[in-house]
Image (spheres, rainbow, N blue to C red):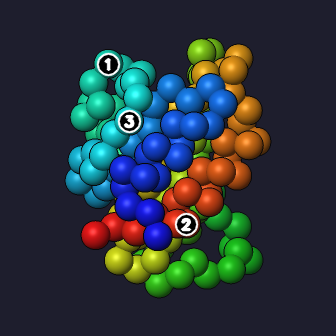
Amino acid sequence: MPGIDECLLAAMTLPGARGAAVVDWISGLALGTAGESPSGDHEATAAETAELARMAAEHTAFVPPDAPEPEKGAPPVEGVIVTAPGGHHLIHFVGGVLDSSVFVHLWIDRREGNLALARIRLREIAESLVLA
């Protein structure tokens, strides 16, 4: 099972990948980063994406009342996609009780990236991540 560095390297092999990070959404700290940061500062980007992740994870507006219960301690959403003029930002929560406060953030170029492929692969990467 891959760790943070291996997962970040796998994310950076995706078409159009500009940057990736593993972030704790409770503290806003980057546990690991690769590539570029949209703001030029990986820590600032981690803190800002953590705010968005917290909002999605803590509010029930995104989850229908008949949705299946998430794993104990896991957020009720799988991920978040933000589309900006120059790129897409994908956030995918890492499942499991111990890892429930962590997500993987991927920034891909809008012209060179493939949003559907990135979403599928990011889910696979997040599911394979093992935090030591």
Tell me which label, 1 or 2, sits earlier in the chain. 1
Q: Position of residue 103 (x, y in %)?
A: 43, 55
Give how far apart the Cα atoms at labels 1 and 2 are. Answer: 28 Å
Q: Position of residue 131 (x, y in %)?
A: 34, 67
User: Compared to 85, does 44 lie above or below?
Assistant: below
Nearest to viewer (mark 3 / mark 1) = 3
Neighbourhood count class around disc 1 (C-alpha, 10 Å): few under 14, some 14–19, many 20 upward: few
Q: Position of residue 73 (x, y in %)?
A: 42, 78
Task: Provide the residue designation for mark 3.
Answer: 34
Task: Provide the residue designation for mark 1.
Answer: 40
Residue in the picture at 68% in, 80% down: 68
Type of residue at label 3?
Ala
Q: Secondary structure at mark 1?
A: loop
Whether tag 3 and tag 1 are in contact, CB under 8 A, the answer is: no
Residue 25 appears in the rendering:
no
Please tell me the numbered disc located at residue 127: 2
Type of residue at label 2?
Glu
Tell me which label, 3 or 2, sits earlier in the chain. 3
Query: In the displayed structure, does residue 18 sit left or right of residue 29?
Result: right
